[in-house]
Image (spheres, grey):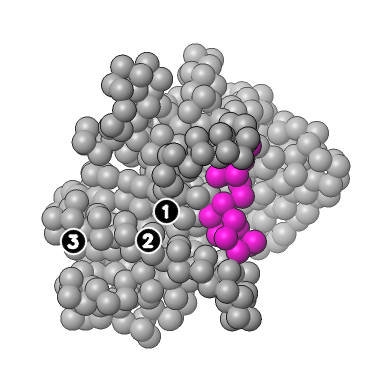
Amino acid sequence: MKGSVLVVNSGSSSIKYQLVDPESGEALASGLIERIGEPDGVVTHRHGGVDREHRGPIADHGVGLQLAFAMFAEAGIELASAGIAAVGHRVVHGGEVFYRPTEITAEVLAEIARLSSLAPLHNPANVTGIESAMAALPDVPHVAVFDTAFFHTLPESARTYAIDSRIAREFGVRRYGFHGTSHEYVSGRVADVLGRDLASLHQIVLHLGNGASASAIAGGKAMDTSMGLTPLEGLVMGTRSGDIDPGIVMHLRRSAGLEVDDIDDLLNRRSGLKGLSGVNDFRELRALIEAGDEAASLAYRVYVHRLRKYIGAYMVTLGRLDAITFTAGVGENAAEVRADALAGLEGFGIEVDAERNAARGREARVISTDASTVAVLVVPTNEELAIARAAREFER
């Protein structure tokens, strides 16, 4: 247990956590605290193959973590005295200020809170989780690992929006990118799987979950990414629209009388697959399609069309392509998405082997044909391990 890292991913009404051995990569324990602030809260905790559950009111993030720590104790682990090296926190937005793992001080926490204007759905929850964890474990370093960090070095041409430059500078308007911890981890694993030097690879990584993003990576450095100032831009997602004409916002304000908060809610929570089909879970979407639901079929086709559009754009951005990799919940599990996204691209050296693609597994694997000049892979992401290894560097 000594030298392990507790990884905390705090949302507005939930906290995911994992106790990780950074050396072996093993998850020693994990859990999910849900419906914080509601009377029917639940904590699910797994350790040693045993699942534990607590149901009842969870007043706030601090109470939730205390319940989780009590479950650790039931399993024989007293976190306060277990020799934990550090606590790693996923923080969504680092702005221009944070672009590497950073030990959290009062000043750092205040800056993360100030950046909430750039990520109003995420950073406030991250701050709350950090405060609760620091109160529970005050004697170990707490380290923030930022979703935006990997994309800090985007070329100016890729990160710059074509709006008034003075306004952009004053209000921090640029493409920041998100899911950076995942894109960095997965692109590194691709090099391992292929037995290639990361510095030699030009690759596209497709992080497809309820939130979804694409990246173009050359020599281990991000050259472009689909998410922008916020996680709303880019691919069609579970509940987010992805790319739209900005004029739609003004049109809805003027013609439909929607306020800014209404439009924000529409584009972030009631759009994407859910807006088109009524569901945002891919398993439910597939069930609807198989039942002949036309709205679900259209939602799927829109999703794949946008995905192919980004793949094509990033092939041109990179100039040459060595690998395309699918990761996250949909990317790792939806074989039909992988097949449809790359269908008909044999002329570009991209050939998916149907049998390899259909095979299921938890290990990183190549699913392209032996003749394909571009490797196609499925690589499970492990953001928790990446965060744990970054936080371990701050061990005292």
Of callouts 1 and 3, the N-terminal one = 1
Tell me the amino acid under the disc marked 3. Answer: Leu
SS majority, magenta:
helix
Q: Do the residues labelled 3 and 2 touch (CB within 8 Å)?
A: no
Tell me the amino acid under the disc marked 1. Answer: Leu
Label 1 secondary element: loop
Q: Where is residue 260 in the image (x, y as percent from the top left)?
A: 58, 31
Q: Residues within 10 Å of mark 3 (few under 14, many from 20)?
A: many
Which residue lies under the disc numbered 3? Answer: 321
Which span of residues is magenta-colored?
A: 261-279
Which of label 1 and label 3 is nearer to you?
Answer: 1
Of callouts 3 and 2, the N-terminal one = 2
Which residue lies under the disc numbered 2? Answer: 307
Of callouts 2 and 1, the N-terminal one = 1
Q: Do the residues labelled 2 and 1 touch (CB within 8 Å)?
A: yes
The residues bearing labels 3 and 2 have C-alpha atoms spaced at a distance of 16 Å
Which of label 3 and label 2 is nearer to you?
Answer: 2
Q: Nearer the viewer, residue 166 or 362?
A: 166
Which residue lies under the disc numbered 1? Answer: 235
